[in-house]
Image (tube, coloured by chain):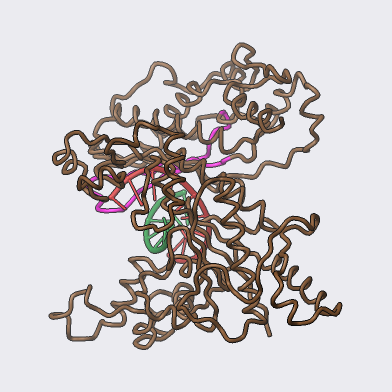
Chain colours: A brown, B red, C green
DNA sequence: CGGGGTAACT
DNA sequence: AGTTACC
């Protein structure tokens, strides 16, 4: 008997709403008042005035969500902003385009959850979902259970008395009591297996672990979540989606196929619009009902697709790799394990959309703003609490979408990222100006080529190829022992590239007085040389650093005490 | 739809 | 390096 993994899928209920705008009562049909209370607390903490008034959160042209006062008046989610404003002139609009708070809270919950999972086996999916591999914790506790059997306790006693599940190998007091003969939360398909031993017992324990972790997250962090427990990521995620919010569901593998068969294939994770369309086209291609059957009317349940198609059809239409993967998915097979998400992101990007950008000066202004945000993100997200770099992006990428380049199509160009980005001796504004003139604008020229006119509706700036920095010694005395020349150490690996190779010329008449040319040798020296006037000294320990590093640095002191 | 993210293809 | 699919 091969032991299956025990996987938990978590997602934060209505995360976007509660974090970005502290919207109360997002769960109108919820019978527990836990959410209402929590949302009210969050709201009072954030912005008490919003509670009494009708307000909505917008992203660009649409209302993405709104509070219950607004809903009572008839405001709808996904309504066009113009319509809503026309209909409700006094509706307060909150801009939900900045995801900063959402990102911060997401990260906090991720770290908090990861600390509870042995080996840190937690994978993040998007901003509001986590996969946890708790197999090792389950196995350890099953072993404890078995050894207590062996030591003479009766079977009956073991089954009826609560079992203490240990969440720590070191501290035997950390954990929770749970029954072995019943699951926590809901059971997918409503069917309980007859055999509560073997792999099924592992899932029963998994349900209790899931419940414990969710309780901790609610009690300590104040967020409700929905959980799914099963033997792989896909089944766990789908199980978790069946009972929301603030609930959990365990899916036993013997019922997995029945469970899956009733779903539309589009509801299976990793089968998006594109794949669904390809699959249905392949299945229904020859059928002469093109005239009377619209795309929406084609039966697309997992059951039907499984019986009308086969693996060969999938492989033929989707390609070997995807075809096989998706076909297996329809049968509850998902061999992709939990891939622990690194602390260091693989890319950081900022984007914005517009009605139309047609001149270089407009593009320049937007790129300045985006570049500033990006640099801020790089300095916050890629630096630890000591102000040391966790990683160095080696490439910068500019992406656009033009009005003519239909639909979701994007075009991008990239180049190496100058290391002035990591310099601690220049202000953020200085670096931004440098980047815009020396890098982003030339990349933009490269992108649009020789054309005289352009019409840009989207700009995205990103850093990618983030190279992990060698781990610094965590010797705390090395930090507190004030090294006056600490900043010089950091500067050693900052080397300046000759900016000549990135000289794609800017089309048009666009010129800037400041950085119209490459730096002189002297100025290059200046890039890496120290500028005493621009850094600051920590009042607590005396370490010197740039002001942006000081922000993170002070958080270090806050954590310490 | 939006603003970010990841990974796999070509 | 750039695109596409997914969440």
Q: Describe residue A194's horizontal placement relative to residue A80 as left or right.
A: right
Residue A403, magenta (yes or no): yes
Instruction: Please report the residue visible at 63 percent of the width from the left and 82 percent of the height from the top.
Output: A196
Please state which of residues A445 and A188 is positioned toward the viewer in this rendering: A188
Location of residue A493 in the rendering, given as x and y in whole percent from the top left corner: 68, 32
Quarter of the image that includes the N terminus of chain A: bottom right
Which residue is at the far top? A533
- Residue at 31 percent across and 80 percent down: it is A282
Residue in the picture at 41% in, 70% down: A268
Location of residue A462 with respect to A424 vertically, above or below: below
Number of numbered discs overlaid on the protein picture:
0
Start-end of magenta stretch: A393-420
Pinpoint residue A249: horizontal percent, then vertical percent: 50, 69
In the rendered structure, does residue A463 fall within the stretch colored magenta?
A: no
| Frontmost residue, A260 versus A470 | A260
Quadrant in which the C terminus of chain A is drawn: top right
**Residue A329 x/y as whole percent:** 47, 76
Q: Nearer the viewer, residue A415 or A387?
A: A387
Query: Which quarter of the picture shows residue A46?
Result: top left
Residue A441: quarter of image: top left
Q: Position of residue A278 (x, y in %)?
A: 32, 73
Q: Residue furthest bottom?
A: A307
> Where is A175 relative to A381, above or below?
below
Q: Quadrant of residue A306?
A: bottom left
Against A252, is A131 above or below? above
């Amino acid at each position: 008997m091969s032991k299956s993994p025990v996987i938990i899928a978590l997602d934060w209920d209505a995360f976007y709403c509660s974090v970005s705008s502290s919207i109360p009562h997002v769960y109108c049909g919820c019978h527990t008042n836990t959410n209402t209370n929590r949302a009210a607390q969050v709201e009072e903490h954030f912005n008490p005035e919003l509670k009494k008034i009708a307000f909505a959160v917008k992203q660009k042209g649409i209302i993405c969500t709104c509070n219950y006062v607004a809903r009572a008046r008839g405001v709808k989610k996904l309504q066009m902003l113009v319509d809503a404003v026309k209909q409700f002139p006094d509706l307060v609009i909150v801009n939900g385009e900045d995801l900063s708070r959402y990102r911060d809270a997401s990260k906090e919950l991720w770290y908090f959850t990861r600390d509870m999972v042995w080996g840190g086996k937690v994978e993040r999916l998007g901003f509001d979902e986590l996969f946890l591999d708790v197999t090792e914790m389950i196995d350890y506790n099953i072993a404890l259970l078995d050894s207590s059997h062996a030591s003479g306790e009766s079977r009956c006693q073991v089954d009826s008395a609560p079992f203490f599940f240990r969440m720590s190998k070191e501290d035997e007091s950390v954990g929770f009591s749970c029954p072995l003969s019943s699951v926590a939360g809901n059971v997918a398909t409503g069917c309980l297996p007859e055999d509560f031993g073997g792999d099924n017992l592992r899932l029963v324990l998994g349900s209790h672990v899931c419940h414990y972790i969710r309780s901790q997250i609610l009690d300590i962090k104040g967020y409700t979540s929905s959980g799914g427990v099963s033997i792989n990521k896909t089944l766990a995620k789908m199980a978790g989606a069946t009972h929301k919010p603030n609930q959990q569901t365990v899916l036993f593998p013997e019922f997995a196929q029945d469970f899956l068969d009733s779903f539309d294939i589009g509801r299976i994770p990793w089968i998006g619009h594109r794949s669904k369309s390809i699959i249905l086209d392949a299945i229904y291609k020859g059928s002469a009902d093109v005239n009377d059957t619209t795309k929406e009317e084609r039966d697309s349940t997992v059951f039907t697709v499984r019986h009308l198609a086969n693996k060969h059809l999938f492989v033929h239409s989707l390609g070997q790799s995807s075809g096989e993967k998706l076909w297996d998915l329809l049968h509850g097979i998902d061999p992709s394990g939990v891939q622990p998400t690194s602390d260091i992101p693989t890319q950081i990007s900022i984007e914005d959309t517009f009605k139309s950008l047609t001149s270089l000066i407009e593009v320049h202004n937007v790129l300045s703003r985006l570049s500033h945000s990006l640099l801020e993100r790089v300095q916050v997200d890629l630096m630890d609490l000591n102000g040391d770099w966790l990683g160095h992006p080696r490439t910068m990428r500019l992406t656009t979408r033009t009005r003519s380049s239909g639909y979701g199509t994007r075009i991008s160009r990239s180049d190496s990222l100058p290391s002035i980005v990591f310099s601690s001796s220049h202000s953020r504004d200085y670096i931004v100006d440098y980047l815009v003139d020396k890098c982003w604008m030339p990349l933009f020229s490269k992108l649009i080529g020789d054309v005289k006119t352009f019409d840009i509706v989207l700009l995205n700036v990103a850093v990618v190829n983030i190279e992990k920095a060698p781990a610094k010694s965590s010797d705390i005395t090395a930090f507190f022992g004030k090294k006056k020349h600490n900043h010089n150490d950091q500067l050693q690996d900052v080397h300046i590239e000759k900016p000549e190779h990135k000289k794609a010329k800017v089309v048009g008449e666009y010129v800037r007085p400041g950085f119209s040319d490459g730096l002189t040798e002297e100025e290059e020296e200046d890039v890496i040389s120290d500028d005493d006037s621009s850094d600051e000294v920590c009042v607590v320990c005396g370490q010197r650093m740039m002001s942006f590093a000081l922000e993170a640095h002070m958080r270090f002191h806050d954590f310490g005490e």
